[in-house]
Amino acid sequence: MRLGIPALYVALAWLLYVRYGRVALFVWWISASVLLGYLWYRNTCSQPMTCDVGGADSRFLTGSPYYFFHYFPFLSAVILLAFGAATLVVMRRHRPGAHLSRWPTTILLGWAAAVLTVAATVLVLHV
């Protein structure tokens, strides 16, 4: 996972949570996790000899269904956990009437929570 993606996720999560509330944050969490999980699968399987000869095709859902059903749910679950940790940081740091100057540290703490969750999840599940 690129290191800028969790920071962007937390910044948008903060904005959505402040403006629209928990429902918008929940929709953002789920949709961003599924989308990024799919893009991570596509990036992984586009490498030579990673997901069979040929890997993922350039079209949307082409390629070997085995690798799609094997990698996509795992990668989406890892992202779901990571973004869930970042979402909890956003919800915990935002209080009604809180001063807006808390958002830079929220982005930093949310980024750290997401990156450490990905590292811990991959380490635990692949060892």
Image (cartoon, grey):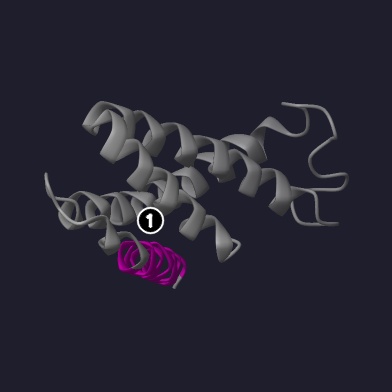
Could you tell me residue 92's position as x and y percent? 16, 55
Residue type for callout 1: Ala
Which residue appears at 31% of the width and 63% of the height? 106
Q: Badge 1 is on which residue?
A: 82
Q: In this view, does 2 lie to the left or right of 64?
A: left
Residue 17 appears in the rendering:
yes
Magenta stretch, overall SS = helix
Q: In this view, does 66 lie above or below 111?
A: above
Residue lying farthest to the left in this orientation: 96
The residue at the point 28 percent across, 62 percent down is: 101
- Residue at (28%, 39%) from the top-left corner? 17
Residue 58: percent from left, percent from top: 85, 34
Q: On the image, which quarter does residue 38 sit in?
A: top right
Magenta stretch in the rendered image: 105-126
Q: Residue 85: where, in percent of width, then height?
A: 29, 56
Location of residue 39 by image quarter: top right
**73 or 99: which is nearer to us?**
99
Task: Estimate how packed mark 1 is, as few (under 14), some (14 to 19) or many (20 or more) residues with alpha carbons within 10 Å.
Answer: many
Q: Does the magenta stretch include residue 107?
A: yes
Image check: 75 left or right of 77?
A: right
Q: Is residue 116 left or right of residue 49?
A: left
Tell me, yes or no, whether the highlighted magenta stretch contains residue 70.
no
Which of these two is toward me, 36 or 94? 94
Residue 52 drawn at (x, y percent): 79, 48
Helix, strand or loop under label 1:
helix
